[in-house]
Every structure is written in structure tokens, then in C-alpha cells.
């Protein structure tokens, strides 16, 4: 049970619905991001710091796809909500491990 919860929190669950919905969030309220723009941002090497950290102030997605698509999701370090979500996720994982471990 705890293992399943931790796996879900780490994004290793087979149901990616939550992360997909965050990945395709609008770039600005009332204006949806065109798939072509999202792909261009994703493929632009200048948006990947050290090749692994996604950093794009224009992209308002909280969890965009990883650089190699299909293997998961990453955090957009330019989005303050992403950093807050990451901190919350890490806090939840540590809390669960501490109290169930």
C-alpha cells in the first residue's frame, strides 16, 4: 500500500492523467498553447539547462514532458508553481517514508 502511494507520488504509476493535464495547461489564461509552440519550446536546447533541467519562463506548464519524450515528466524550474509542487511532493514523500518506514 505505502509502496504504491510512493510510486504514484514519484510519477511511476501507470495512470498519467494528472501529469498529462498539468503538461498541457494553457500558457496564459484564456489562450491555449498550440502543440507546435509546445514542441518548439521542448525541442529548443536553450530551454534545457545542463541538458537535463527544463527552464522556460514562457511555458506555464507545471510538469512538461522529459527531454526524451515518453519516459516521464519533469519540472519547469522557471515556473514558481512547479517549484512549489516539487517541494510539496518531496515533503509528502519524506513524511510518508518517515512515518511508515
Image (cartoon, rainbow, N blue to C red):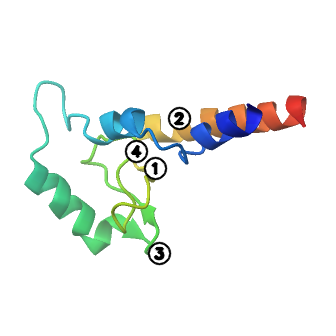
Residue located farthest toward the top when viewing the structure as drawn? 30
- Sequence-first disc among 2 and 1: 1
Task: Say whether marks 1 and 4 touch (CB < 8 Å).
Answer: yes
The residue drawn where x is 44% and y is 38% is 15
For label 4, the SS is loop
Depth order, front residue of 62/77: 62
Q: Which mark is residue 75?
A: 1
Task: State which quadrant residue 4 falls in.
Answer: top right
Residue behind mark 4: 63
Up/down of 46 relative to 41, above or below: below
For label 1, the SS is loop
Task: Say whether marks 2 and 4 touch (CB < 8 Å).
Answer: yes
- Gap in Å between the C-alphas at discs 2 and 4? 9 Å
In the rendering, at what x and y percent does residue 13 appear?
Answer: 53, 43
Residue behind mark 3: 50
Task: State which quadrant residue 40 falls in.
Answer: bottom left
In the rendering, at what x and y percent does residue 35 appear?
Answer: 12, 50
Residue behind mark 2: 85
Q: Residues within 10 Å of mark 1 (few under 14, many from 20)?
A: many
In the rendering, at what x and y percent does residue 7 appear?
Answer: 63, 43
Up/down of 54 relative to 91, above or below: below
Quadrant of the image containing the C terminus: top right
- Gap in Å between the C-alphas at discs 1 and 3? 14 Å
- Gap in Å between the C-alphas at discs 2 and 3? 22 Å
- Sequence-first disc among 2 and 3: 3
Amino acid at each position: 500500500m505505502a509502496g504504491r502511494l510512493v510510486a504514484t507520488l514519484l510519477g511511476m504509476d501507470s495512470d498519467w492523467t494528472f501529469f498529462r493535464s498539468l503538461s498541457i495547461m494553457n500558457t496564459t489564461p484564456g489562450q491555449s498553447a498550440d502543440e507546435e509552440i509546445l514542441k518548439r519550446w521542448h525541442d529548443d536546447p536553450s530551454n534545457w539547462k545542463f541538458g537535463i533541467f527544463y527552464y522556460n519562463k514562457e511555458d506555464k506548464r507545471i510538469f512538461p514532458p522529459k527531454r526524451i519524450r515518453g519516459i516521464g515528466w519533469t519540472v519547469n524550474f522557471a515556473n514558481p508553481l512547479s517549484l512549489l509542487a516539487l517541494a510539496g511532493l518531496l515533503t509528502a514523500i519524506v513524511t510518508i517514508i518517515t512515518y511508515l518506514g
